Amino acid sequence: MFPFLPQLDGERRRSLQTFQRKAGIRFRDIGLLDLAFHHRSFSNETTKDRVNNERLEFLGDAVLGMAVATRLYLLMSDRPEGDLAKTKSVVVSEETLSEIALAIGVDACLILGKGEELSGGRRKKAILADAAEAVIGALYLDSGYRAAEQFVLSIIDPYIALVMENRHHRDYKTLLQEHVQKTFKAVPKYALVKKSGPDHDRTFWVTVEVNARVYGPEQGKNKKEAEQAAAAVAARELSLLD
């Protein structure tokens, strides 16, 4: 079905079979599953066709959104649309999907270009989350919506429960910004203090200023993570956390 991809050797087939067992799914066309793990960095280096998992990711995002939205509509029948939207944004976030991806072994199956491999791409949240969505898209094409929905709910339901119990990973930047805008009619000011480490393993240090008080610096593997860490400290100091 995919002549532009290399033939699957025995080792690759065993790897994909292990993934299926761990994820609790079964593909009729294992080539679709294989394609779901091909990052654009690999195709850019190896083929002029530029074939990768991005189209499957696009499809999987839609299937994921539909499955989660339906689940929340039924579970949160007494809650307004805004609460459903906030919950959905957390459970389909990059943070959540990358955590799920690691739990089911997506990282071990990724096919990356040499540069991306050397820069730690196998552990990058965006790549992991995108591949998880691509797997959902591939399963939808392979086995239909019902199978894809069952898979989505099997991996997402525990996170929906965490959000509803307020025990999930928080978006501290949004929480802090909403508070600062409401209380001080301003926005938090983030500043990159320093970067350390080699290009493939950088650490970023960021502070955040709220009402003339500076919190941090806090660190992360990219600016976004460091900003979240600084916002978490500020939110804790301002008694915004439950």
Image: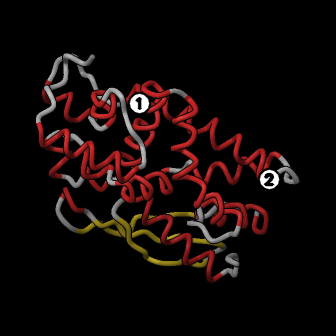
Label 2 – label 1 distance at C-alpha:
29 Å
Residue drawn at 50 percent across, 65 percent down = 228
Residue position for label 1: 138
Q: Position of residue 90 (x, y in %)?
A: 60, 54
In which image quadrant can residue 111 be found?
A: top left
Residue type pointed to by label 2 = Met
Q: Position of residue 153 (x, y in %)?
A: 58, 48
Q: Quadrant of the C terminus?
A: bottom right
> Circle 1 — which element?
helix
Residue position for label 2: 76
Q: Residues within 10 Å of mark 1 (few under 14, many from 20)?
A: many
- Between residues 121 and 148, which one lies in front from this camera angle? 148
Q: Is residue 148 left or right of residue 76?
A: left
Q: Position of residue 221 (x, y in %)?
A: 33, 63
Residue drawn at 59 percent across, 76 percent down = 234
Asked if residue 140 is positioned above or below residue 149 in the image, the reply reads: above
- Between residues 62 and 225, which one lies in front from this camera angle? 62
Q: Residues within 10 Å of mark 2 (few under 14, many from 20)?
A: some
Asked if residue 1 is positioned above or below residue 101 in the image, the reply reads: above
Disc assigned to residue 183: none
Residue drawn at 46 percent across, 37 percent down = 136
Whether residues under marks 2 and 1 lie with C-beta atoms below 8 angstroms apart, the answer is: no
Q: Residue furthest right?
A: 78
Q: Position of residue 222 (x, y in %)?
A: 36, 59
Residue drawn at 65 percent across, 62 percent down = 161
Residue type pointed to by label 1 = Ala
Q: Is residue 29 left or right of residue 210?
A: left
